[in-house]
Image: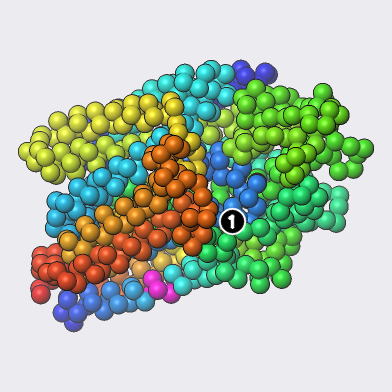
């Protein structure tokens, strides 16, 4: 069957499924809207968390980045999985025990301060909206490429669909649709990887194939890859670090603590029945995530090898002639994300690291995962499946983030601070309205995105790492951090991070407003802006510590609250001081 | 033992467990995958250089195991101090 038609059918079928589930699971009460009645099984919750977590950045973008960065790309692999260990060991069980709806609510109660709650709401909204804009862009690009409509049209379709199940269904709708989305996206990711691994190495398991010899040869795949990339003048694939060891360290740490502080992931752990379930839920979530994350490096290396060997076949007379280029090459040329320029007029494609002779003048890293099955000449249904998977990843994350935004606005800002007497019904309405406006706002910014992809995601993580994670961790593990300390810490941490990112990348990434420009010479200890969240976090911890020690200690009822959340069973509040 | 002391002893054991697990978390990622990456690359695991294996595979598998070990040990600890949820 023709690829275009097949893509319509596969994408259409998966979408009908998600919508059907959203309608079937329509939420009733406020509590159900946010946390699905607290009745989700840990394995199911883990799967939904995995879908929430793996966004367009993980699915569409990450393996492409690794394919070109090689070893340096490991920061994403370790950073976006290692954060779950912090989440499980340091935050999830305690927040579940605390048992309210939102992250700012905990921060407000623990630091007995409306100011702390409002600062947390602001940090949360900035982080989540930034992240959603990136997702909306992913949705728009994927729709426009596979459905052959304009980017704006693709984005509009995406907005309508996100609106439909996030706004109508609430958390419960999202939980069940996200389980369906997890299944679609993980199959879409692994099936092509299995095919490719089998073809290249004879081993159907990509994680093992990556460490195997090439089929019919004694050479290891990775050695071969190092050989072909260095032949073209690129750095060795398996050993090239991202800038420096310190930068890789900071990058990985920022992504880890950013993961542990992201509100849409944390909120998941409010949806399990018991504290013990919060612990195991995190384990299941990471187990499901690990399927994609251990496959990604195989996809990356194999795609890079296939790409190079298609253009410059090793054992034949010479390079690929431009006239004989395969269909995928032509298709991606149309999008402008892949470009060829015949510099020496020989009609052949020369690919090299040398900018003066390289004729592959543009190879956008974000096309690698989507183009991979085509490059490997897999059947059309596999290519259609990749489209459905990419959309599932982008949509599920956008929906989870929207929920976090809407609960921050309606629950924390309206009910918690501005209108404490608001009725449940009106709170629910406000929550739906804020979701709809967040979709509109993010979609509007997504129409004309000022350089998004990696930059947006890095900012969202930096904000979360520098503001929310330290506040939560100190709130649970320290009895001495008080209201002034927490507020000062969050404000200092997020300000330092935003200043650093904006001064190099532009205010909200608008390039003209970068007051120091994209200048590695000005980087603090050579740490790139994407990796700066960890420095913000250190500032946050230090400021909170100092301020708390020169101001009054937290009151006894707060100490009781800390004791209460530290033990899993319910009678902790009776502890006497 | 009065509840307050019990809760304190429980918390100390909890912190000890978390410290050990986080030490492992640090070793497989930051130590093996970044700081000692080049040293470990002298060894190999099939076609993987060992440092690269930790950075792209081994650290992730270890993370999953760490969380399940934590969940299991904490359940035991809850029971030992009579602080479990049932």
- What residue is at 30 percent from the left and 46 percent from the top? A124
Q: Secondary structure at mark 1?
A: loop
- Is residue A86 visible in the rendered image? The answer is yes
Residue found at the far bottom of this picture: B1
Task: Relative to B41, say whether A155 is above or below.
Answer: above
Q: x, y percentage for residue A221? A: 76, 53
- What residue is at 17 percent from the left and 76 percent from the top? B4
Query: Is B18 inside the magenta-drawn segment?
Result: yes
- Report the chain holding disc 1: A
Q: x, y percentage for residue A315? A: 90, 43
Task: Relative to A188, say whether A289 is above or below.
Answer: below
Q: Is residue A436 left or right of residue A231?
A: left
Which region shows up in magenta? Answer: B17-21
Q: x, y percentage for residue A95? A: 27, 56
| Residue that numbered label 1 is attached to | A242
- The quarter holding residue A110 reads bottom left
Q: Is residue A339 left or right of residue A471?
A: right
- What residue is at 29 percent from the left and 47 percent from the top? A123
Q: What colouring does the structure picture have?
A: rainbow
Q: Is residue A153 left or right of residue A324?
A: left
Who is closer to the viewer here, A125 or A407?
A: A125
Question: Image quadrant for the N terminus of chain A?
Answer: top right
């Amino acid at each position: 069957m023709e690829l275009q038609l097949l893509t319509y059918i596969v994408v259409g079928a998966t979408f009908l499924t998600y919508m059907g589930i959203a309608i079937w699971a329509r939420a009733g009460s406020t509590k159900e809207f946010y946390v699905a009645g607290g009745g989700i099984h840990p394995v199911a919750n883990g799967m939904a968390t995995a879908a929430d977590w793996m966004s367009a950045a993980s699915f569409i973008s990450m393996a492409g980045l690794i394919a070109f960065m090689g070893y340096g790309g490991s920061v994403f692999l370790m950073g976006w999985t290692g954060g779950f260990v912090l989440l499980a060991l340091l935050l999830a069980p305690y927040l579940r025990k605390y048992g309210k709806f939102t992250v700012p609510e905990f921060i407000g109660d623990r630091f007995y301060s409306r100011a702390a709650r409002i600062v947390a709401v602001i940090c949360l909204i900035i982080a989540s909206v930034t992240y959603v804009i990136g997702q909306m862009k992913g949705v728009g690009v994927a729709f426009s490429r596979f459905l052959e409509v304009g980017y704006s049209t693709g984005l509009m379709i995406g907005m309508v669909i996100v609106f439909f199940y996030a706004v109508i269904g609430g958390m419960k709708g999202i939980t069940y649709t996200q389980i369906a989305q997890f299944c679609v996206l993980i199959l879409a990711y692994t099936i092509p990887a299995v095919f490719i691994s089998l073809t290249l190495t004879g081993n159907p398991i990509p994680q093992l194939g990556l460490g195997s010899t090439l089929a019919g040869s004694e050479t290891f795949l990775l050695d071969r890859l190092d050989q072909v990339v260095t032949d073209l003048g690129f750095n060795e694939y398996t050993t090239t670090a991202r800038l420096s060891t310190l930068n890789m360290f900071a990058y990985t740490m920022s992504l880890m603590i950013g993961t542990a502080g992201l509100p849409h992931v944390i909120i998941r752990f409010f949806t399990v029945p018991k504290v013990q379930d919060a612990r195991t839920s995190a384990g299941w979530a990471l187990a499901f995530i690990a399927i994609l994350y251990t496959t990604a490096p195989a996809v990356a290396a194999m795609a890079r090898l296939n790409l190079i060997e298609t253009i410059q076949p090793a054992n034949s007379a010479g390079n690929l002639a431009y006239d004989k280029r395969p269909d995928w090459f032509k298709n991606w040329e149309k999008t402008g994300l892949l470009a060829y320029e015949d510099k020496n007029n020989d009609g052949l494609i020369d690919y090299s690291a040398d900018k003066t002779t390289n004729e592959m003048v543009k190879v956008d890293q974000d096309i690698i995962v989507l183009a991979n099955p085509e490059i490997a000449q897999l059947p059309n249904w596999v290519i259609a499946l990749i489209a459905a998977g990419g959309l599932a990843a982008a949509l599920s994350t956008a929906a989870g983030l929207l929920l976090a935004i809407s609960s921050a606005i309606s629950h924390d800002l309206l009910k918690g601070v501005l209108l404490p007497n608001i009725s449940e019904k009106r709170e629910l309405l406000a929550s739906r309205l804020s979701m709809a406006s967040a979709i509109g706002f993010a979609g509007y910014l997504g129409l004309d995105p000022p350089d998004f992809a990696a930059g947006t995601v890095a900012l969202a993580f930096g904000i979360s790492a520098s503001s929310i994670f330290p506040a939560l961790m100190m709130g649970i593990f320290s009895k001495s951090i008080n209201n002034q300390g927490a507020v000062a810490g969050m404000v200092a941490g997020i300000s330092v991070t935003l200043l650093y990112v904006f001064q190099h990348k532009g205010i909200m990434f608008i390039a003209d407003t970068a007051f120091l420009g994209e200048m590695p010479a000005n980087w603090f200890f050579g740490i790139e802006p994407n990796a700066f969240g960890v420095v913000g976090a250190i500032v946050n911890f230090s400021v909170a510590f100092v301020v708390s020690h020169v101001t009054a200690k937290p009151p006894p009822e707060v100490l009781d609250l800390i004791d209460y959340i530290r033990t899993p069973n319910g009678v902790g509040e009776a502890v006497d001081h | 033992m009065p509840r307050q002391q019990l809760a304190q002893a429980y918390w100390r054991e909890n912190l000890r467990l978390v410290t050990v697990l986080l030490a492992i978390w640090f070793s497989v990622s930051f130590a093996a995958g970044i700081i000692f990456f080049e040293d470990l690359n002298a060894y190999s695991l099939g076609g993987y250089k060992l440092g690269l294996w930790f950075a792209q595979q081994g650290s992730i598998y270890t993370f999953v195991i760490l969380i399940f070990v934590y969940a299991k040990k904490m359940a035991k600890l809850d029971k030992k101090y009579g602080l479990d949820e049932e």
